[in-house]
Image: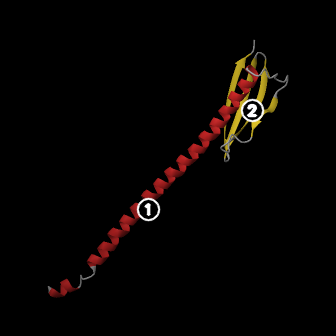
Amino acid sequence: MNKYKKNQTGIILLLTLFILSGILVVTLVAADLVFAGIKMNRLTGYSNLAFFASEAGIERSLWEVRKNNYVLPNIDTINIFSLNDLGNGSAYQVDYASSTPNVIFKSIGSYLGFKRSIEGSYQTQ
């Protein structure tokens, strides 16, 4: 019986190594999930900034036409209004299309390679 006990002298060290390896694998997987979530959150923020820039382009277009009496061209026009930097690195470009009595603005906002667009229309009298 003593001979059998002497042959198991390294089993605790081996068991400890397996347990710590398992904990390390679980920790690395959890860290990878957290970093993926952080990256997704940052990219969603960039997309939101592009959307808000696009919305700013639509608002400017409506302001120019309704309040500043901007005369719209008779033909469809690309890049009727644009702003290359809204102060945070975002930009917009507004395209214009008209089919009487509807006026259609399409604003494309961009931020760090992300692009979002909004289309707004109204009827003239």
Residue drawn at point x = 49 percent, y = 50 percent:
37
Q: Quadrant of residue 16?
A: bottom left
Image x and y of residue 108, in percent: 70, 36
Q: Mark 2 touching mark 1, by CB under 8 A? A: no
Q: Nearer the viewer, mark 2 or mark 1?
A: 2
Residue annotated with mark 1? 28
Task: Please tell me how crowded label 1 is: few (under 14), some (14-19), or many (20+) other residues with Cα within 10 Å.
Answer: few
On screen, 109 above or below 34? above
Measure how far apart labels 2 and 1 are at the Cα level.
Answer: 46 Å
Q: Nearer the viewer, residue 116 or 88?
A: 88
Image x and y of residue 75, in percent: 85, 25
Quadrant occupied by the N terminus? bottom left
Q: Nearer the viewer, residue 98 or 9?
A: 98
Q: Quadrant of residue 50?
A: top right
Decide if residue 117 is in sight here: no
> 7 left or right of 111?
left
Image x and y of residue 79, in percent: 79, 34
**In the image, which disc is placed on residue 97?**
none
Residue drawn at point x = 63 percent, y = 37 percent:
51
N-terminal of the pair, mark 2 or mark 1, is 1
Q: Amino acid at mark 1?
A: Leu
Residue drawn at point x = 21 percent, y = 86 percent:
6
Q: Nearer the viewer, residue 45 or 88?
A: 88
Q: Amino acid at mark 2?
A: Val
**In the image, which disc is placed on residue 94?**
2
Decide if residue 113 is in sight here: yes
Which SS class for mark 1? helix
